[in-house]
Amino acid sequence: MPFDEKTEQKLRKQILTYKISELMTDRERARLLGLPKGCRIRENAKIISPENFDCGKNLWIGEGVILDASGGLMIGDNTHIGSYSMIWTHTAREQALAGETEISRDKIKRAPTKIGENCWIGGPSVIYPGVTIGDRVTVLPMSVVIKDVADDAIVAGSPVGKLKNLEQKVSQLEERIKELEDK
């Protein structure tokens, strides 16, 4: 399914912008892409549908990151997105399963994705469409986030689990073992 002329022009402009940005510093690249004050974006990072991307100041985007804003992407102040992470706001799974790739875009599902302030997303990690990550969240490297994460959580794994809950369970088990040993 070919693109219309307007879409082709938009894509061509975006491709040329990224090509030019290869010769810039992280801060120059961020300014070229219209990111707020204090933001930095490393080489080979991409923002898909930048018109739907809203971010705070002092955002750090690592090398090779893909930020898909086609369904609406919001990232808060002072957040770090680790190298080679992927943050999605759309999925073409249903389109592929229906055999409609390059036939129709009707089955592509889009959902806004949100990452709060003061978060650290270790790379490479994947955040699924429609997920909301709260403030001050740590996502350890190589994690896959498929559901919302509350403020102040530390999560890891594929799919992620809350580490604070695991630490609490270990502590409870250690206490129980001590009780049994004392009997």
Image (cartoon, helix red, strand yellow):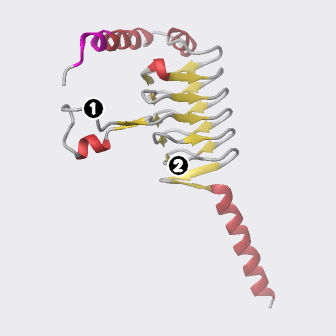
Q: Residue at x 50, y 9 (%)?
A: 32
* Amino acid type, mark 1: Arg
* Quadrant of image for the N terminus: top left
The image quarter in which residue 105 lies: top left
Task: Say whether residue 6 is magenta.
Answer: yes
Q: Residue at x 56, y 40 (%)?
A: 122
Q: Is residue 181 left or right of residue 146?
A: right
Residue position marked by numbered label 1 in the rendering: 105
Name above or below for residue 41 compared with residue 103. Answer: above
* Figure disc tally: 2
* Quadrant of image for the C terminus: bottom right
Q: Is residue 175 left or right of residue 160?
A: right
Magenta stretch in the rendered image? 3-9
Query: CA–CA distance between discs 1 and 2?
Result: 25 Å
Q: Earlier in the sequence, mark 1 or mark 2?
A: 1
Q: Position of residue 86 (x, y in %)?
A: 45, 35
Label 1's element? loop
* Amino acid type, mark 2: Lys
Q: Is residue 153 left or right of residue 47?
A: right
The one nearer the camera, 179 or 127, is 127
Q: Residue at x 19, y 42 (%)?
A: 99
Residue position marked by numbered label 2 in the rendering: 147
